[in-house]
Amino acid sequence: MTVMEQRGAYRPSPPPAWQPRTDPAPLLPDAEPYRVLGTEAAAKADPELLRRLYGQLVLGRRYNTQATALTKQGRLAVYPSSTGQEACEVAAALALEDRDWLFPSYRDTLAAVARGVDPVQALTLLRGDWHTGYDPYEHRVAPLSTPLATQLPHAVGLAHAARLKGDDVVALAMVGDGGTSEGDFHEALNFAAVWQAPVVFLVQNNGFAISVPLAKQTAAPSLAHKAVGYGMPGRLVDGNDAAAVHEVLTDAVRHARAGGGPTLIEAVTYRIDAHTNADDATRYRGDAEVETWRAHDPVRLLERELTGRGLLDEDAVAAVREDAEAMAARLRERMNQDPALDPMDLFAHVYAEPTGQLREQQELLRAELAAEAEEGAAR
Amino acid sequence: MTVMEQRGAYRPSPPPAWQPRTDPAPLLPDAEPYRVLGTEAAAKADPELLRRLYGQLVLGRRYNTQATALTKQGRLAVYPSSTGQEACEVAAALALEDRDWLFPSYRDTLAAVARGVDPVQALTLLRGDWHTGYDPYEHRVAPLSTPLATQLPHAVGLAHAARLKGDDVVALAMVGDGGTSEGDFHEALNFAAVWQAPVVFLVQNNGFAISVPLAKQTAAPSLAHKAVGYGMPGRLVDGNDAAAVHEVLTDAVRHARAGGGPTLIEAVTYRIDAHTNADDATRYRGDAEVETWRAHDPVRLLERELTGRGLLDEDAVAAVREDAEAMAARLRERMNQDPALDPMDLFAHVYAEPTGQLREQQELLRAELAAEAEEGAAR
Amino acid sequence: MTTVALKPATMAQALTRALRDALAADPSVHVMGEDVGTLGGVFRVTDGLAKEFGEDRCTDTPLAEAGILGTAVGMAMYGLRPVVEMQFDAFAYPAFEQLASHVAKMRNRTRGKMPLPITVRIPYGGGIGGVEHHSDSSEAYYMATPGLHVVTPATVADAYGLLRAAIASDDPVVFLEPKRLYWSKDSWNPDDPPAVEPIGRAVVRRTGRSATLITYGPSVPVCLEAAEAARAEGWDLEVVDLRSLVPFDDETVCASVRRTGRAVVVHESNGFGGPGGEIAARITERCFHHLEAPVLRVAGFDVPYPPPMLERHHLPGVDRILDAVARLQWEAES
Amino acid sequence: MTTVALKPATMAQALTRALRDALAADPSVHVMGEDVGTLGGVFRVTDGLAKEFGEDRCTDTPLAEAGILGTAVGMAMYGLRPVVEMQFDAFAYPAFEQLASHVAKMRNRTRGKMPLPITVRIPYGGGIGGVEHHSDSSEAYYMATPGLHVVTPATVADAYGLLRAAIASDDPVVFLEPKRLYWSKDSWNPDDPPAVEPIGRAVVRRTGRSATLITYGPSVPVCLEAAEAARAEGWDLEVVDLRSLVPFDDETVCASVRRTGRAVVVHESNGFGGPGGEIAARITERCFHHLEAPVLRVAGFDVPYPPPMLERHHLPGVDRILDAVARLQWEAES
Ligand SMILES: Cc1ncc(C[n+]2csc(CCOP(=O)(O)OP(=O)(O)O)c2C)c(N)n1
Ligand SMILES: Cc1ncc(C[n+]2csc(CCOP(=O)(O)OP(=O)(O)O)c2C)c(N)n1
Ligand SMILES: [Mg+2]
Ligand SMILES: [Mg+2]
C-alpha cells in the first residue's frame, strides 16, 4: 500500500445516498485551553520532566534578556524576544526525538537553542554576519524563517519525504497567530492532511502580529478551530503552562509518528516584550494587559508548582539560576567578539559552481578588496 | 461606530481567566447536505420560483450542450461545461438582487448568462476574440476568473467597499472544490470574516479538479467545515437540488445584507462532462460513477417535483424546451459570425494613455498591417 | 514680498503628508496594509492617518499580502482608490499573482471598462542593515509586467509629488520607496508642498559634459557623490534620475547621452536581468552613433542580497562607479 | 556495421522519456504537480509515470502551487529530487514567493549545507491559442532571481538532454518548456537517447556571416525560418540557440557576434524589461568595437498576452525579424 492509498479522506456519493464521512467531532478543540499546572493533571506529570522543563525555562528567559541586552549594546542588529513564550519554545524542543525536525519561525531562536543549536550560531541571522549560522542537518533544525508561514510547507514536505523513505521522523513546525492568515499556512495544512504527513503545527498565539491584535487577524472561535477544515485534530492549550504544552505536543508527535497524521495546536500565550527591540509597543497596547499576563508568567507558574509540591528547593532554584547566568556570561563574551567575515563569501554559495558571470564579479570584488587593503596599508 | 469596530472577533484573556468566545456550534454544517426536492420542505417552496428555476435549468442545460457543440465546430476554442451543475449556476444568479455582484470562476459562464450577460459576450474569452466580452458594470458580473480562487478576495474587497460607502450590496463568489486548496481561498475567507463583509462563498464541489478527485484535494469532513475556522457559518447543500441551493443562497445573501457577515456554502454536485472538450475523462473515472449522478440530474429532479405536484404540464415543458431551442439557434447563428477584430486593440487598453514605448510599437504594427494589406491587395 | 518658511522634512514625512493630503482631498482613497493603522507602519509612513481619518480609511489588515492586494482589487472595482503598503520588498512576493495576473491586466482584460487605480507602496532596497528578505530590489519583476507603472522617488519633493501622482493615476502604480532614504532630509514649505509631478519624466540632477550616470531611487545620492568625486579625476559627470521606470523617459535619457557620448547605468538591483540591461539596450538602440564606449552597468552582484555586515561590498558605491567611468574608453577620444 | 533505428519523437515524448529515465535511474527523483499522476498531465508529459513508478513517485497534489513548490522544498531538504510541474506559466505565480525567497536562496542561506536540487517544469509561451493566463513568457522574472538556473530547450534532443541535466543538477532549475513545440517532431534513437547536455552552453543552430540571430525556446524555429527567408534578401544569418538563460554563455554568443558584427535578439517575452535587454547589453559591453550596428531586439509587444485570435500579431514572426535585420545599418558597410 502506498502512502497515497492510506488516506482516509472523503469522496461524497450522490446526495440521495449520502455516505457517512470523517466524524468532525473529535477534530474540534476543547472549549478551554488545556492546562496541567495548578490542576489535578499536574500530579500525574513526571517530576523529572517538570524539573527539566523548569531548568530550560530559566535558561530560556535568561537567553531572551541577554539577547535583548546585546541589541542595546549594538552586538545584535535586532532581536525578536520570546519572553513570556518560553514554555512553548522549550516544550517544542523537548517534545521531539533526536531524529525529528524543527521548523522555527523568526521568533523561535530559543526553540533552536533548546534543541541544541549553538547559542551564538543561532543568532547569526540577527547579528547580521550571515543568513543562517548553523548547519541545519546537525540538529535537524531548519533555518529560522523570516517570510511568515513559508516554512510550514517545508515541514510538510520533509515529513512526507521521510515517510516515503520509511523513516519514522516527525516535523514540528512553528508559526505565529499572524502567520495563520497567510495562504502558505492553509496550503501546508491541507497538504499535510491529504498526505497524512507526520507533522505537528504549533501556533503560538501571543495576541499580536507586531501591532495587530488577534481580533483584527481572525474572527474564528479559536485558531485551533481551523483544524477541522483540513480534517485534522485541533488542540487548544495554555501556552504558558510548560507541562501542558509539552504533553499536548508529545501526544501529537506520537500520533504523527504512529501514522495518525498531522495535528494543529494553538498555544495561547502572550508576547511580553515589544515585537523586537526596534518596536514601541506602547503605541498599540496598554500596560494593564501586559501586567495581567505577567501574573501568568510561564517560569513562575512552573516554579510555583514545583516548589509547592516540594519538587524544587531553594538550592535547586539557585543552581538553575547560576547555570543561566553562566550561559549568559558565555553568550555575552562570545558575542562581544567580532565575527570573522570574508566578503568573497558573497559568491561562494549561490550555486554549487559559480557561473561565469559570478566569476567575473568575484574578480571585480577581489580587485576592490586588494585596492582597499593597499590604501589601508598606505595610510 | 466604524465597520472595523463592529466585528465580533475574539481576543483571549489570559488562560487563568479564559473568556467565553464565539460559539462554534452554529457555524458547523449539518451532517447531510440540505435538500428540498422530494422532501417535506418542497411543499413550502413558492411554485412560481420553482417554475422559474425550472425554465432557467432547461435553458442552462441547452446552453451547455450548444456551447460544447460549438467547440466541435471550431467556433469556440474551449468550453468548460457546467452540465450537471446547472442548479448551482442558475440559483446563484437568481438569489441575487440587481445591485449585487457576481464573481464567477472560469466554469461559470452559465451563471453570468443567467444573470443577464449577453450569451455571446459571455463566450468571448472562450472564443478567443478578447479576454472578457462584457462590461462588468452592466450586470455587475466580474470577469470570468481563470486563475483559480483569485477572484475571491476581489469579491471580499468589493463587498467591503460597498459597505464602506453605505450601499447594501452583496457579493456572491463562486469557486470549485479544487480552488479551495489555494491560498487565495483562505485569505479571502479570513478577510471576509474579519471585516464582516457581505459576501457569500459558493463552492461547487463537483468531485474533481480536472482529473484530481476530492479525496486527493482534501481530508476534511466536508468543505463546509472550513467555515468555522474563519468564524463564519458553513452550509452543506445538495447542489443538484435547485430549490435547496436557491434557498440556502438566498438565506446567506439576506444574512450578509443584514450585516451578519459572510457564509461559506458547499454545494455537492457533479461534473457530468469532461473538464473541457479538450479533456478525456475516461482516463480518471469510470462510467458507473457518472451514471449514478445522471440519475440525480438537477433538471430531472426539479421536473419530477413539479410534474408530480401538478405544477407543470406537458405543454409547459414543451414551451420551455422550445424557448431553449430558440436560444440555442440564436446562439449558433451569432457564433457562426466571425467576430470583428482590430489588431490595434492590443495597445488600446494597457494603460489609460499608451506610454511612449507602446506608441512606438503601435506604429510598428500599423506599418506591418499596412504592408500586409498591400500584399493582400497585390495578390 | 512674502517670506516662505522653509522647514526640514524627511522623505518619510513627505510621504506621510502625501497620503494625508490624498486622503483629505478624495474620499475614495483608502490606505491599507499590515500595521499601517494603530502603529502607523513599521517606517511610520502612515503615522497618525488612522487617528485622523478613521480605521476604515487607514486599515490594519490581516497578515496576508495576496489578500491585501486581492481585496484592494475588489475595492478598486467598486470605485475606491486603495493605497496598499507592503511591509518590505520581499513580502510583496506572496501578492505576485494578484499583481501580475489581475492588477496589471484588469483594464486590458475589460477593454478599459474596469481600470484599477491602485497604488502599491513597497519599501525597497538595502543599506539599512536589514536581515534577509528585507533589502531586495525587486523592480525588475515589476518592469517586466506590462500594465504597471513603476515609480521611485529619490528626493523629499519627489516623494510627495510622485506619490500624489501615483494615487491620482487611473492606472496601477508600483511605488518603490528607497528605504535608506526615508530619513534623508531636505527643506520644503509645508504650507505649500511641491507640485504633483506627472509620472514618466526623468530629471537631470546634475549637468555634466563627460559622461552620464543614469540612475534612480537609492542610487541617486550615491551617483551625485560619485560625480563630485569624479571632478578630482577630471570628469564632469551628468546625473539623470529616472524617477519612473515605466513609462521610461527615453527623451531625457537619450538627450543626455547624445550630449555626453558615454553612459553608466547604476542601480542596487542585481545586474543580470536587472533594469540596467533594458536601459543600456534602449540607449544603445537609440544613440549608437553617439556612443564613444559601450553603456556600462554598475549594479548589485548577481547574488541573493547579502547579510547586513557584508552589504557594503554588494552595493554600488562611489569607487565602483568611478571604476566604471574609468572604463569608458577615454583613450579612444584623444 | 550496426544500423541505428531512428524513430520520430515529439518534444513531449522526449520529456516523458527524460522523466522516466530519471525516475528509473535515481530513486530520489519524485514528480509532482496538478494532474500529473492519473491523467499524465494536461500536456501528457507525465503520461504513464504514475502507473510505472507508483503514485508516491509521481503524485497528484492538491491544487495549490505555493504548496506544491513549498513541499518540494521540504522534500529536497530530506534528500529527494523533486521535479515539480506547474500547469501553465501564469499558474506558477502563486509559487513566486517560495521560488524567489526559498528555492533560489536556501543554498546561499545555509552556506551550501542545504542545496535544493529541485526542477520546476513550466510550460511557457504562446502560439497555441490559449486563453488568458495560458501563454505568458515569464523567463524575465526567473532570470532576475540569482540562485536559479533557467533553461529552455528548442529541439527534441535538447528536451531530453537538458531535462536530464536539470534533474541531475544540485541547484534549482527553472525548466521552461515551449508549449507550442511540444508536438514538434524529430527523429531519434529511443534505445540510445541523446547525451545529457551540460547546462550553460549555447549552440549555433545555423552558421552564417551577415548577422547573428540570438534566440531560445519557441523562437528558435522561427529564427531558422527567418534565416532561410533572408537568403532571398542576400543575408546569410547565423542562429544561436541559447538553451540556458542562466548561466549565460557569453563565449558562444560573443564569438558569433564578433564574427558577424551584427545581432538581433529574438524572443516572445515582452520587450521592455525582458531578456533581450540583458542580452543586448552584455553583447554590447563585450563586443562594442565589433558592432556595425546596435544590437536590435524583436520581442513580444509590451502588452498583456493577447487573446488567441490576435496572438499572431504579437508574436515575433519571420517578417518582423527580417525587418529588424534590415535595420542593421547595412549602408554603413559599403
Ligand atoms: C510574508 C511576510 N509578511 C510580512 C512580514 C513582516 N513581519 C515580520 S513579523 C510580523 C508579525 C508576525 O506576527 P505573528 O505571526 O503573530 O508572530 P509573532 O511576531 O507574534 O511571533 C510581520 C508582519 C514577514 N516577515 N513575512
Ligand atoms: C492558479 C491556477 N492553477 C491552475 C489552474 C489550471 N486549472 C484550470 S481548471 C483546474 C481545475 C479546477 O478544479 P475546481 O476548482 O474543482 O473547478 P472545476 O473545474 O471542477 O469547476 C486547474 C488545475 C488554474 N486555472 N489556476
Ligand atoms: Mg503573534
Ligand atoms: Mg471541481
Image (cartoon, coloured by chain):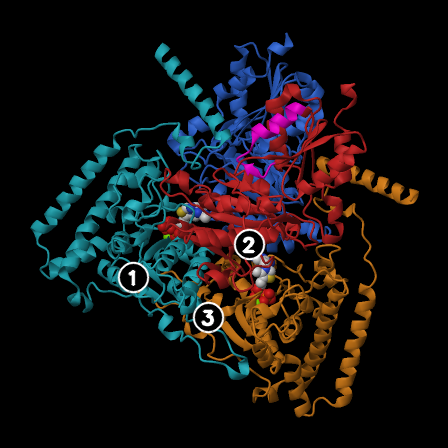
Chain colours: A cyan, B orange, C blue, D red
Q: Is mark 2 within 8 Å of ligand 2?
A: no
Answer whether residue D245 is magenta in the image.
yes
Check the residue under mark 3 and report the chain it is in.
B
Answer whether residue B377 is magenta in the image.
no
Residue on which the image places disc 3: B225
The image quadrant that residue B228 belongs to is bottom left
Ligand 2 located in image quadrant? bottom right
Residue on which the image places disc 2: D16
Check the residue under mark 1 and report the chain it is in.
A
The image quadrant that residue B163 belongs to is bottom right
Closer to the eye: label 2 or 3: 2
Query: Could you tell me residue D240's position as x and y percent?
Result: 64, 34
Region in magenta: D242-259
As drawn, C250 above or below D1 = above
The amino acid pointed to by label 2 is: Thr
The image quadrant that residue A7 belongs to is bottom left
